[in-house]
Amino acid sequence: MIERMSAASPPADLSSELLSLARAIALETGRMVVEARRGGVEVADRKSSPVDVVTQVDRDAEQLIRTRLAEVRPRDGFFGEEGAREPSESGITWVVDPIDGTVNFLYGIPHYAISIAAVAGEPDPQSWRALAAVVVNPVTGELFTATAGGGAYLGAQKLAIRAPAPLAESLIATGFAYSEKTRLEQGAAIARLLPRVRDIRRMGTASLDLCAVASGRVDAYFERTLSPWDHAAGALIATEAGARVSGFDGRRADHLMTLAAHPDSVEALEAVLRDIGA
Ligand code: IPD
Ligand code: CA
Ligand code: CA
């Protein structure tokens, strides 16, 4: 048993054990979510704004993940988007987005994910140490995984980011907040960025955006106002594939900014993003 595990040095076999558990639970939850959608899906509630919606399936998925984790690791903490919180007695906390890309899920766009990360330390992205991560798109079956120091994978294939590209030839993924005021600022920033890059992608699922950096499907990704569950798993996957994932000014990725890119490109990209007011 792990007593108050240090955030600095996780044993590799522990990370693998956490990954196996997360993988099994993410796949089971994915099957449940896809099946539930076949029966039709409706908005159950609005959260931070009228466009920030939750369905009963989001809640049921979080409950399933929490129950399964507690069966095997009752002393771990839990930090889920739909409100479930459990303090950690083991030093490990599970940071969970039961359905990332809920708007895609609602509309039947086959691009959403179950995102599960195990972190050591408090569930705070400024201080946690991510140990294991799973992001699965249950519609396509694509399963992204990573352990700290153990690399990132899509299924059995080891992932590596793309070689660095000039900004003008970079495909950049991003996302938008649910707040109207922030969206006005984000829209203005995108208008300035679009003429300077190959193109922009807004795919609707932050965890999969980070996995897209990991798998070389985009050159970079940035987004303001993410919550810990949006990036916990995807950031470890992108990092283990060779990306630098950070905030601005040397901060770690968090609510203020999450930026993922090739380590040789990240500084220039930060300067441009500042310039356009992203
Ligand atoms: C959202 C998605 C989206 C991102 C938003 C997130 P949700 O998560 O990841 O791509 O732009 O910032 O809140 O609400 O679908 O879990
Ligand atoms: Ca999310
Ligand atoms: Ca969600």
Image (cartoon, rainbow, N blue to C red):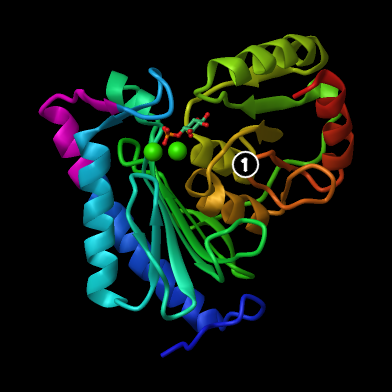
Image point (67%, 57%), residue name: 126
Whether residue 31 sits left or right of residue 266 in the image: it is left
Q: x, y percentage for residue 253?
A: 68, 48
Q: x, y percentage for residue 255?
A: 62, 41
SS at circle 1: loop
Q: Magenta region: which residues? A: 32-45
Whether residue 15 sits left or right of residue 65 in the image: it is right
The relative height of residue 89 versus residue 168 in the rendered view (above or below) is below
Image point (23%, 53%), residue name: 63
**Is 75 in front, or is 104?**
75
Residue 48 colored in magenta in the image: no
Where residue 82 sits, quadrant-wise, is: top left
Question: Badge 1 is on which residue?
Answer: 255
**Is 173 in front, or is 56?**
56
Q: x, y percentage for residue 183?
A: 60, 16
Give the total of numbered labels.
1
The relative height of residue 242 versus residue 217 in the rendered view (above or below) is below
Looking at the rendering, the quadrant in which ligand 3 lies is: top left
Q: x, y percentage for residue 52?
A: 40, 25
The relative height of residue 189 versus residue 155 in the rendered view (above or below) is above
Residue lying farthest to the left in this orientation: 39
Whether residue 113 sits left or right of residue 158 in the image: it is left
**Tag 1: amino acid:** His
Image point (25%, 47%), residue name: 61
Where residue 171 sits, quadrant-wise, is: top right
Within-10-Å neighbours for mark 1: few <14, some 14–19, many 20+: some
Image point (20%, 36%), residue name: 56
Quarter of the C terminus within the rendering: top right
Quarter of the N terminus within the rendering: bottom left
Where residue 137 sits, quadrant-wise, is: top left
